[in-house]
Each structure stands twice: as C-alpha cells, then as structure tokens.
Image (spheres, helix red, strand yellow):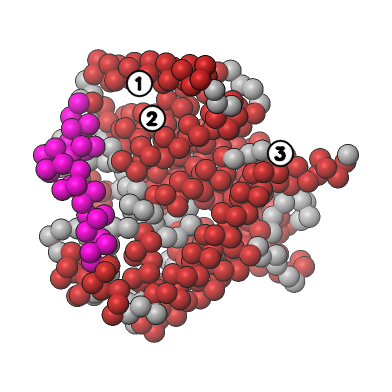
Amino acid sequence: MERSLSNKAGLFVILLFAISPFVGYASYTIIDKDEGPFLLMFSIAAIGFLLYEKWNLRMATHTIFFLFFCIFTIFSDLYLTGAQGNVNYFLNNEMLGSLLMLIVIDNIYCTNRFYRLSFNISVLVILIAIVVIIIQQTINPRLMMPESEWFRFSNYEIEDDRLPSIYGYLGGMHLLGICFFPVLIIIIEDFILREKSVLYLIFFFMAGIVVSFLNKSRFMMVNAAMLFLLIPIHFGFNIGKLVRYLVIGFLGLFLLYHGSKYFGYDADQIIEERILEKESGGIMAGNAGSRIYAFTVFKELFPDNPVLGKGRLHSTKIEESRDRDLVRLISGITSQIHVGYLSLFYYYGLIGGGLYVLFLVFLTRKLIRDARVTGRWGPLIGWSMFMVSNLVIVSLDIFIMGVALVLVFNNYYLQQQEEELETV
C-alpha cells in the first residue's frame, strides 16, 4: 500500500497542508484566490485514486458522523439559506473539504521517511512563523498578510491589534491559534521522547509564549499554556520538580518581559489594553463581554428554529448578512455569536449540532485510546486546542493544517506501535 499511487497522492495532500501558509500566499499572490479549492481538488484526486485501486474506502466512526454532518450542512445551505449549488459552492465548501481530508487521512499509510520529512518541514514552518511574527511586531506588520487585512494597521498602534504571523492567508487572524500551537506541541513532544537537549525544549516552550503574546489574543495564550501539559505527562510531577519548573518559568518570563522592553516592545501596554482591556472598562466589558453576550443572543433566537437551525445566513461583515434578527441584536456590539458551539446549534439546530458533537466525542475518544497505547499525548492536546478555541471563536471546519497534521501524526504513532507489537 505504501508504494501505491493512491497512497502517494494522499501523502502529497498532507504535505500541502504542512506548507499551506505558503500555498495560500502563492495562491493569493498569483491568482488572487485562497488555497482551499486547490487542497479540496487534490483531496478529491487522492480519493479518486483510492477508489480506482481498491473500490472501497475506510472511514473511522468519527468520519462517518462528520459525513452525516456535512450532508446536513449542504442541505441547510441549499434549502434553508438558498445557496446556489454550483461548482463554486462545492469547491469553497470548507465542511466538504474537512470531510475529504478525514477520508484521505483514514486511508493513507504514513511511512517512516514521510514522517521525518513532514516533521522536519513542520519544524521549519514553525521557525519561519516565529521569525515572521517578530518582524511583524518590530518592523513591518503587513509582512505575509493579505492586502484585505492591511486596514487593521492604518489607524491603530501596532500594540492594539492581533498579528497573524504566516497564517494570514489561510482565512483569518484566529488561525494562528489552531495551526501553530497544535503543530508546536507535536514537535515539542517528539523532542522530549527523543531526549533532545533541554535547550531545544526551553526554546520552543518560550517560543509558544512569545508568539501568543505577540498575537495578543487571550485564547492564543490559553493554547500556549496547554503546551506545558507535556511536562507532568512526560517528566512526572512532585514538589521538587514543581519548584524547578516554576523557577525556570519565572526566569524565562522575566527575561522575555525585560528583553521585550529593551527592544522597544511595550509589554505593559499589551497587558493593560489587550489582555486586561482597561480602556474598554475591563475584561467583562471588552471582548470577553461579547462572548457572554453571545449566550443572551442565543437564548433569544435559538428557540425560533431549534431542530433544523436558522441556516448560515449571517456574515461577520454586518452589511452582507441576510440574518436580520441576528443583526438586530448584535449590531454595534459584536460581529457574530462569538462562541463556536452556540453558533453551531444556532446555524444547524439540534440535528446538525448533535451530529457535530458526536463527531467531536468519537474523535476525542479515539485520540485518548491511541494516546494510552502510544504514549504520545501531543495529538490529543493539539486537538483539544481546537475544541477549546471554539469556546471563544467560531471555527467549526477542520480543513486546516493544525488538525490535519495532528491526525496524521497520531495515526503514524499508532501504526508504529502496532507494527512493533507484531514483530515481538
């Protein structure tokens, strides 16, 4: 299987995900289009090769539930919101892309050579992402950013807005959190288990903190904190080690804080205005308040369409939204129902939302079981970052590099463990 054309096609799709920030950059630069349709078409081609060679596809339980969810979202789009079911609709359908990605991952065999290649590429991408966000903060905030986002830095101080690093061309400022950190935790865990120098570990742990701080989003900081779950998992936890980790962490933060001020980065302003939001009246009156308000909006509107949902009529660009009821409640306060799971049930009702939750449950259960077998908890934590992120953002599709690589690497670890047991 590993030498088959279909497997090579599937692995090529995964490589495209691994370098997707640069695929997106090239796509926007050359033809002014995002990378999604290209990844989707390559996924279709890979599945086509699979069907040609063996006429059947493996689908994990979580993939089957996502299949049903994807079908429901297409029904919702076509019959509840009146979307045009043309080629352009399907090529830009991120839920369909997510389904195809899952099917590809379920049916490929990841070789040792491919793992090392994709892992090394991921390390390089992470290093570039770190360098780019530092340059965005200190020299040029528009580096590796679509022109459509340049307006963010025309009226504000650089300390006032979020920086996307290399992930701006993938569709939103928030994607750094669910692309960078899930891949970073895979890298750190690999270095831990290969007993790399502690300097490597300190560098990448600190890099996670730096990137989250430069991005200035609180949920990025939560994802950065989740990296440290690897410490008790792989090094154990006792009072002596706790004190050691606290001292190292304190010294690291101390050096980062004063080092940033030395280079002209106003860390105090970030803490006060972006994290604590003092100018907005505090956290509860700022962005966090919009998440709390989301529950109020959901409570008022969800009962009108509880079973099938309202459909995805809304656009975060208020002037383009066709959901007048939602706009009436959020206009001037926020841009959407700013909690992913609430948006899920508002758009797709109990049926669609229920199918998606079942997908989450079965995939999470698989990752827990696999981690117990392989001893690799990075994929589970990386996936948890995606789920936690949807408590404060809306990013329901998984057609993104962070999720793709986490699932591929997890399958590789399980595959290696099974092959080792067979040789015993």
- Earlier residue among tags 1 and 2: 2
Give the residue type that dot 2 points to.
Ile
Local secondary structure at mark 3: helix
Work out how far the residue at label 3 is from the one at label 1, CA to CA, in angstroms.
37 Å
Mark 2 lies on a secondary structure that is helix
Image check: 387 left or right of 333? right
Quarter of the image where the N terminus is located: bottom right
**Which residue lies at the image location 45% right of the left edge and 63% below the top edge?**
94
Q: What residue type is labelled 3?
A: Arg
Question: Is 370 in front, or is 32?
Answer: 370
Given residues 8 and 243, the one toward you in this image is 243
Extent of the magenta region: 268-297
* Of callouts 2 and 3, the N-terminal one: 3
Residue 249 visible at all: yes
Residue behind mark 2: 209
Query: Image quadrant of residue 308?
Result: bottom left
The residue sitting at 59% across, 25% down in the picture is 235
